Image: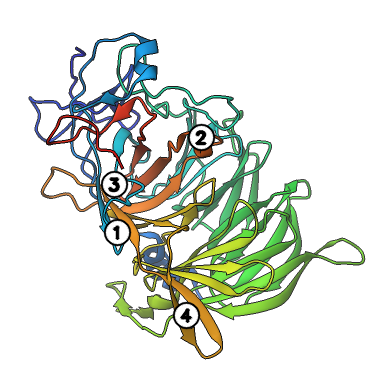
Amino acid sequence: MLKSKRWSGKEGSSSGFRRTQDDPSSAEVSTNSSTVQRNSSGQVGNSMQSNNTFVTSLFRSADSALPSKPKMRSSSGSSKERNSRAYRRKDIAWAKSVNHGKPPGTRAFKNVYFRQRFRGLSGSIWTMKFNKSGTYFAVGGESPVVKIFKVIDNIIHSDQRSSVVDDGDEIKPFFETNPVRVFEGHTKPVVDLDWSQANFLLTASMDTTVRLWHSARGECLRIFKHGDVVSSVVFHPCDNITFLTGCFNGKLQMWSMVQSSSVCSANAEDYISSAAISNDGQSAIIGTVNGRVKFYTMRNEVTREWKLNDTTQIDVRSERAFEVRIGSEDGLKRDLSKKVCGIAFSPSDKEILITTNDAHVRTYMKNDKSLTRLYRGHVALNNSLRGTYSNDERFLISPRGKVLSIWDKNEAGVILTKGRNRVDVVHAYEAITIEDERANSKDTITGALFAPSADLADTGNYTIITASSGGTVTVLQRANLDNEVQRPNPEEGGLQRR
């Protein structure tokens, strides 16, 4: 039996899922030798000062609930025995999963447990991303500091997934909780970041700059100054020295790391809230706060030089309208129901996932820009929340308040006809609640994504990473019938089989 330790309150400390009985306001959870800590936690304006209140509200969230505190205890049995049979673990915190519009017994994420939790930042986390090889994990947000954490359970390039249970029968952590790099240099919150194939990291900030870093270097390598707040930054997938940025003044730019300057630009004539580049590197997409999505080609077809040409525009605005008051100083009102929160290409590069804050997540075909499916159950009125794909493209995930919404793309939808258009609307989804024992907790989930994996078809061991407005990173692990960790049946003491 491992002795529990009181939470130290330090930012880099961890807490493995173990209750600290002598301090009801804090909990520490043991995951092998590492631990995870738990603590409470449109149009562009002409001047930067007038935009500060509005800009901050686009990324700031109200606070989120964290998982309840479980106990860990050792079980007998050799490592070989543990890997050959499913364990009935009653000492693990299991997440609450609820079906919405799905038949009973069809929950794909019924058996999900809390694997790890630690403090990622001192303030709200607004952006997070794995590097291309899945070895590092970067977080940024309300604090101007960017932190890099090392992934222990790296399963992208391994032939076989490692066991989540160690020789001491403890749940192994997914991350090292002490950051390998802490990048300091920005003077205002970090709103977006992206990795290159060569482990270069770009960070976009409200201080109107983009900074270049590398996982092996502790200092800033380049600073790229912009004319307004940079809302989006993305590396070109086929060119490690070129990247795309989108600003709140509507300017879209391609940059060269070598020249340290912009090589081409375009005017979106709207407040850019998100941007993405297709996996083949042929096209770029931007989303705006007014619900418009614009498509650009990235090269001149004759000279093959960089050139952003506006080709197509689609309107993803909902007919519903929400007037939300933001900012207490000038009483500014904005219609936030039209904002495009995030854009993501599917791993196969055939679909485009567009997240908006009108309670919808939409998928469009990349080739003809047609709307293929509309997923309901997403709510993000005041947040910059983005939907993401799982690696096998079966599931979509998006946070909403204290709940994770997960849609199964294999789920049948309802065909709705609007004029000449036929849209498949999916109402069914699973909701995973991240609860907290603290009555005064107001933390909300600010981001969620699936950890990269290469063996989902064989194991189905999906790992979900969430971030909160309190700066906490939580790792959720899906257990299946072939996994070492199984959810006990409350009535029989056995497994809950799907």
Secondary structure at numbered mark 3: loop
Q: Residues within 10 Å of mark 1 (few under 14, many from 20)?
A: few
Q: CA distance from mark 3 to mark 4?
A: 31 Å
Q: CA distance from mark 4 to mark 1?
A: 31 Å
Q: CA distance from mark 4 to mark 2?
A: 39 Å
Q: Nearer the viewer, mark 4 or mark 2?
A: 2
What residue type is disc 1 on? Pro
Q: Which mark is residue 3?
A: none
Secondary structure at numbered mark 2: helix
Q: Residue furthest right?
A: 302
Marks 4/1 in contact by CB < 8 Å: the verdict is no
Residue 483 x, y percent position in the rendering: 38, 28
From the viewer's perspective, tell me whether residue 316 is left or right of residue 483: right
Q: Residues within 10 Å of mark 2 (few under 14, many from 20)?
A: few
Q: Nearer the viewer, mark 4 or mark 1?
A: 1
Residue 434 x, y percent position in the rendering: 25, 47
Q: CA distance from mark 1 to mark 2?
A: 25 Å
Question: Circle 2 sits on which residue?
Answer: 458
In which quarter of the view is residue 265 placed? Answer: bottom right
Question: Circle 1 sits on which residue?
Answer: 103
Q: Quick check: 138 above or below 270?
A: above
Residue 110: tell me if it is visible: yes
Q: Earlier in the sequence, mark 1 or mark 2?
A: 1
Question: Circle 4 sits on which residue?
Answer: 317
Residue 269: tell me if it is visible: no
Q: Nearer the viewer, mark 1 or mark 2?
A: 1
What residue type is disc 4 on? Arg
Q: Residues within 10 Å of mark 3 (few under 14, many from 20)?
A: many
What residue type is disc 2 on? Asp
Q: How many marks?
A: 4
